[in-house]
Amino acid sequence: MKLVIGWLYASTMNIYGDRGNVIALHRRAEWRGIRVEIREIGIGDPIPEDVNCFFWGGGQDQEQAAVAADMQGTKGEALRAAIEDGASLLAVCGGYQLLGHEYRPHNAAPQPGVGLFDAVSTAGPERFIGNVIVESEWGELVGFENHSGLTTLGPTATPMGRVRVGRGNNGRDGTEGARYRNAVGCYLHGSLLPKNPALADWLVERALARRRGDVQLEPLPDTIESMAHAEAVARAAATR
Ligand code: GLN
């Protein structure tokens, strides 16, 4: 088996430790004897056909503008096609926003999105910064948010989960993130996957299942991951 990770805009959208998500996907596959290749997909690069797991991190608004333009047309169509064909994806913050229909920053032109998630994001008057706990189908997820963008989900969108601590998509409707097929977008930096191994393994399993049918990964001894998760939850709960 081989996991091919497509790291979208690795050099332009990689803030608040988001690269830790790529490291977690890489290591959790490798620890199970699965070969891993990582392909950085930058501005002007096509979407490689053999990628079965995508990661797209956060970035500042000005960096998002160039990336949004790059992802229009055939590149965005190729990414949508890969997700429709079963590839898995995790996008965080700015990457998540650009997978909706549009991101509207402060004092700048709207940035067109890929349209994978039925969602629209608009920069708000307040910056949401802090620990977040989300109840989801992967259990309790914990992360750190730092965004001014407020994301509103459309009628066909499914949230990633419900916020127990923190602000989430918009601080109003209790939702966090979005999910479509094997793609998940959210505001959870941290980085997210090292402290939430169930989600990391799900992304790897879904990626491998695209070509091999159902895949069940052997459990790993997640002692350290569980300690990190519990510590982050305790800190988040203390900030309520
Ligand atoms: N556009 C993002 C925001 O809402 C940029 C920050 C991020 O990606 N963490 O603030």
Image (tube, rainbow, N blue to C red):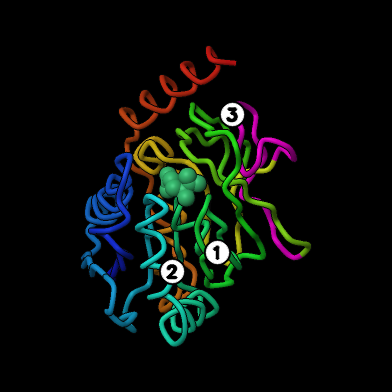
Secondary structure of the magenta portion, mostly?
Answer: loop
The picture quadrant where one finds residue 232 is top left
Judged by depth in the image, the label closer to the viewer, 1 or 2, is 1
Q: Amino acid at mark 1?
A: Pro
Q: Are marks 3 and 2 in contact (CB under 8 Å)?
A: no
Dot 3: element: loop
Binning the other alpha carbons within 10 Å of mark 2 as few (below 14), some (14 to 19) or many (20 upward) gives many
Q: Residue at the spot x=69%, y=57% of the render?
A: 158
Q: Nearer the viewer, residue 90 or 187?
A: 187
Q: Position of residue 23 (x, y in %)?
A: 25, 49
Dot 2: element: helix
Among numbered discs 1 and 2, the one appearing first in the sequence: 2
Q: Residue at the spot x=50%, y=82% of the render?
A: 81
144 in magenta: no
Q: Position of residue 145 (x, y in %)?
A: 48, 36
Q: Are marks 1 and 3 in contact (CB under 8 Å)?
A: no
The magenta-colored residue range is: 156-174
Q: How many marks?
A: 3
The residues bearing labels 1 and 2 have C-alpha atoms spaced at a distance of 10 Å
Q: Mark 2 = which residue?
A: 68
- Work out whether residue 178 can be spotted: yes
166 in magenta: yes
Binning the other alpha carbons within 10 Å of mark 3 as few (below 14), some (14 to 19) or many (20 upward) gives many
- Work out whether residue 93 can be spotted: no
Q: Mark 3 = which residue?
A: 166
Q: Mark 1 = which residue?
A: 110
**Split into 4 quadrants, where in the image is the C terminus?**
top right
Q: Amino acid at mark 2?
A: Ala
Q: Residue at the spot x=28%, y=44% of the render?
A: 20
**Split into 4 quadrants, where in the image is the N terminus?**
bottom left
